[in-house]
Image (cartoon, rainbow, N blue to C red):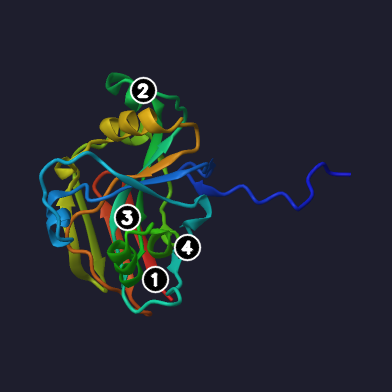
């Protein structure tokens, strides 16, 4: 007889470029990490302390399809660099931060913007706008041994072939080592944690039938159909 009183929840994984799988423990998402996106969202682009929200591991989805979610009429795309950790700890020194990275991928932080806006007005958490089912389309993770630590390069997103978002990884206000070090001051990071590293300006709505193509130079291309 199992010691568990319910069926063990399924371990959630995302694919890796070598055909393996990366088990996900936690998902940290940084907000307003590109100055132009901070401006378009109505905020000062000056370097303020970073802030994070979370998605759930099973929100990450590698199927290539994004089901249009319920209770919304304004779903936005946000293309982001995904960082996967192979180890962690607390109070990680900035100089040691990249030693904890397993690899990188392309991801989308899909957002029910209307619901997020309602939560902002009431000073409530954002999960209803950010952490819904399949809200994190992802491509395969590439190991550091293949891709290095990308800190510059074009990041972009098209919808039905039309360019919506475009920027460069070097425009991130908080760089990957800084995010890891900062998070480790407040949380104990661990293997399986992933960080979604922020989006450039140009976020906008999608509709059923749209095809999104997210790309990050040297990391890859992720194509997702809105269904």
Within 10 Å of disc 4 (Cα), the crowding (few <14, some 14-19, many 20+) is: many
- Front residue of this view, candidates 16 and 198: 198
Does residue 145 show up? no
Within 10 Å of disc 1 (Cα), the crowding (few <14, some 14-19, many 20+) is: some
Q: Which is closer to the viewer, label 2 or label 3?
A: 2
Where residue 15 appears, as percent x and y from the top left, is: 50, 48
> What residue do we see at 42% from left, 75% from top?
68
> What residue do we see at 44% from left, 59% from top?
131
Where residue 140 appears, as percent x and y from the top left, is: 43, 48
Residue hosting label 1? 225
- Label 3 element class: strand
Within 10 Å of disc 3 (Cα), the crowding (few <14, some 14-19, many 20+) is: many
Q: Are marks 3 and 1 in contact (CB under 8 Å)?
A: no
Residue hosting label 3? 221
Which tag, 4 or 3, sits closer to the chain's start?
4
Picture quadrant where residue 94 is located: top left
> What residue do we see at 14% from left, 55% from top?
43
Q: How far apart are marks 4 and 2 (CA)?
A: 31 Å
Residue hosting label 4? 134
Within 10 Å of disc 2 (Cα), the crowding (few <14, some 14-19, many 20+) is: many
Which tag, 1 or 2, sits closer to the chain's start?
2
- Front residue of this view, candidates 136 and 158: 136
Side of 15 relative to 121 (left or right): right
Residue 92 is tagged as 2
Which tag, 4 or 2, sits closer to the chain's start?
2
Which tag, 2 or 3, sits closer to the chain's start?
2
Which tag, 1 or 4, sits closer to the chain's start?
4
Picture quadrant where residue 225 is located: bottom left
């Amino acid at each position: 007889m199992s010691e568990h009183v319910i069926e063990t929840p399924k371990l959630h994984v995302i694919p890796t470029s070598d055909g393996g799988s990366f088990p996900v423990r936690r998902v940290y998402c940084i907000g307003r990490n590109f100055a132009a996106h901070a401006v378009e969202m109505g905020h000062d682009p000056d370097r303020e302390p970073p802030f994070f929200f979370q998605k759930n591991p099973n929100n990450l989805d590698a199927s290539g399809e994004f089901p249009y979610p319920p209770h919304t009429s304004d779903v936005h795309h946000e293309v982001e660099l995904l960082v996967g950790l192979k180890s962690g700890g607390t109070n990680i020194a900035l100089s040691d931060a990249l030693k904890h990275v397993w690899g990188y991928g392309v991801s989308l932080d899909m957002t029910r913007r209307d619901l997020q806006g309602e939560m902002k007005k009431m000073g409530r958490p954002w999960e209803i706008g950010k952490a819904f089912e399949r809200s994190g389309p992802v491509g395969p993770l590439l190991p550091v041994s293949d891709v290095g630590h990308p800190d510059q390069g074009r990041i972009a997103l098209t919808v039905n072939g039309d360019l919506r978002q475009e920027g460069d990884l070097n425009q991130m206000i908080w760089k990957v080592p800084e995010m890891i070090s900062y998070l480790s001051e407040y949380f104990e990071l661990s293997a399986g944690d992933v960080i979604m590293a922020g989006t450039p300006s140009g976020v906008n709505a999608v509709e059923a039938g749209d095809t999104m193509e997210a790309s990050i130079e040297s990391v890859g291309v992720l194509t997702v159909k809105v269904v």
